[in-house]
């Protein structure tokens, strides 16, 4: 069967733990009624979950770890859930029989979504007109992938803009963001620190073993070390490796968490738009285990049961910080991870993701 197919829509069984608690059927129903009013070009959606790793590499040609490639293949058609009618999805990897038989493929077919690969994209574009590119996240590698197909950079972000995105995606942005928030929202919380030397990191470890050490660029809990139950002989080599590859580590206090949640945003034309909340599960080591499927009202109640904080004040303060340090230089989806401690205190900025997130799927 040719890769350029019309694929379709319905309930999907979860292909991986990464979306194990997202109700694909419910999400598909939400987007079923949304028609694509063609005010411009068709959108070309690309699921490239390796984007954070590619940003870290800063290379035009990048091969992600095997587990990321596996996820990319299994969920290649995931954008069908939020794509509009008659949009297109570009496959980075080869089309497989598993894709053809998947429920996501049925969603594509019903929504008349065209599935393309690198061999068919250029001819489709020449036949129907150029696309607006909508990857999971931008980086030099996906830019180069598209450039190599077309032989030009029409419609692509500049390398300079991706360089700025890379700097904003660095975890030190959470420190800058934290410092923009009003004092009453961060009272009693410890400011994350960027550390450039192994010796300094180990000094902090010896004083307080309940810490998270984080690689500047990583995702879904990868690139995070919880040191609480590890000996120095395990912690030190990990920190040394991250500093050698990425230049530093970011250190955070490991709070006893009652809940993980996120605020989801869209930056567009210099403005910041709040999309809604998502609630998700993580391990003690910070690894992402999936989102909870519920209405916005239900998610808000889940958050309020765990926290004594004013959510509207948190969202307002986050928006001001985004407007100041992110939206002037970035357009696209954005998710901010937060946590609630066992004492009901909200850490208003644990992570900032300048890309799509699993929590956005039901909001787009």
Image (cartoon, helix red, strand yellow):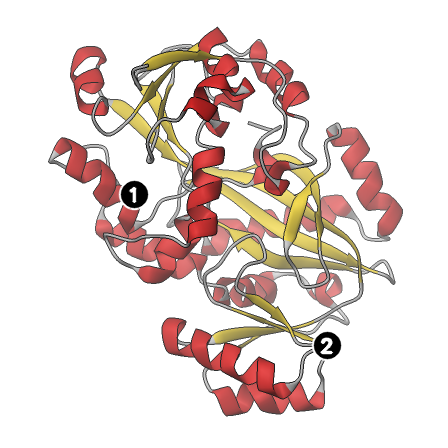
Q: Quadrant of residue 3?
A: top left
User: Where residue 103 sits in the image (x, y, percent)?
Assistant: 55, 18
Residue 260: x and y in percent read 72, 51
245 sits left or right of 130 in the view: right
Residue 42 screen position, x and y as percent? 33, 18
* Whether residue 280 is situated above or below residue 228 in the rendered picture: above
Q: How many marks?
A: 2
Residue at 43 percent of width and 53 percent of height: 52
Lower position in the chain sequence, tag 2 or tag 1 = 1
Quadrant the C terminus occupies? top right
Classify residue 98 as left or right of residue 307: left
Q: Nearer the viewer, mark 2 or mark 1?
A: 2
In the rendered image of this protein, does residue 198 appear above or below residue 6?
A: below
Q: Hey, which residue is sitting farthest left in the picture?
A: 151
Q: Could you say where residue 293 lies in the image, as x and y percent from the top left?
A: 72, 31
In front of the other: 127 or 338: 127
**Mark 2 surroundings within 10 Å by alpha-carbon count, few (fewer than 14), some (14 through 19), many (20 or more):** few
Q: Which image quadrant is residue 18 in?
A: top right
Q: Secondary structure at mark 1?
A: helix
Label placed on residue 285: none
User: Residue at the location (17% across, 18% down)?
Assistant: 123
Residue where numbered disc 1 is placed? 142
Q: Residue at x 52, y 14 (%)?
A: 107
Which label belongs to residue 229?
2
Note whether residue 195 is visible: no
Residue 142: image quadrant is top left
CA distance separating discs 2 and 1:
38 Å
């Amino acid at each position: 069967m040719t890769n350029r197919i019309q694929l379709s829509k319905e309930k999907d069984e979860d292909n991986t733990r990464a979306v194990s608690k997202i109700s694909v059927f419910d999400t598909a129903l939400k987007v079923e009624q949304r028609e694509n009013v063609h005010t411009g070009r068709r959108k070309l959606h690309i699921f490239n979950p390796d984007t954070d790793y590619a940003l870290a590499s800063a290379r035009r040609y990048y091969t992600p770890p095997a587990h990321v490639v596996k996820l990319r293949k299994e969920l290649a058609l995931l954008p069908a859930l939020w794509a509009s009618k008659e949009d297109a999805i570009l496959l980075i990897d080869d089309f497989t029989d598993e894709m053809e038989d998947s429920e996501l493929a049925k969603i594509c077919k019903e929504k008349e979504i065209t599935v393309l690969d690198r061999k068919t994209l250029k001819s489709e574009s020449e036949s129907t007109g150029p696309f607006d590119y909508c990857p999971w996240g931008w980086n030099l590698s996906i830019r180069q992938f598209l450039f190599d197909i077309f032989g030009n950079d029409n419609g692509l972000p500049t390398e300079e803009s991706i360089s700025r995105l890379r700097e904003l995606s660095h975890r030190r942005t959470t420190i800058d963001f934290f410092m923009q928030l009003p004092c009453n929202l961060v009272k009693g919380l410890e400011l994350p620190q960027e550390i450039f030397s192994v010796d300094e990191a180990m000094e902090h470890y010896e004083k307080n073993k309940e810490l998270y050490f984080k690689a500047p660029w990583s995702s879904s809990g990868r690139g995070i070390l919880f040191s609480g139950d590890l000996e120095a002989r395990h912690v030190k080599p990990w920190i040394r490796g991250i500093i050698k590859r990425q230049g530093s580590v970011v250190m955070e206090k490991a709070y006893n968490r009652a809940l993980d949640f996120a605020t989801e945003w869209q930056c567009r034309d210099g403005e910041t738009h709040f999309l809604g909340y998502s609630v998700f599960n993580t391990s003690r080591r910070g690894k992402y285990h999936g989102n909870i499927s519920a209405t916005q009202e239900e998610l808000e109640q889940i958050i309020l049961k765990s926290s004594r904080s004013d959510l509207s004040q948190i969202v307002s303060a986050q928006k001001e910080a985004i407007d100041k340090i992110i939206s002037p230089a970035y357009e696209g989806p954005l998710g901010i991870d937060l946590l609630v401690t066992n004492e009901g205190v909200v850490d208003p900025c644990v992570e900032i993701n300048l890309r799509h997130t699993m929590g956005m799927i039901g909001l787009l």
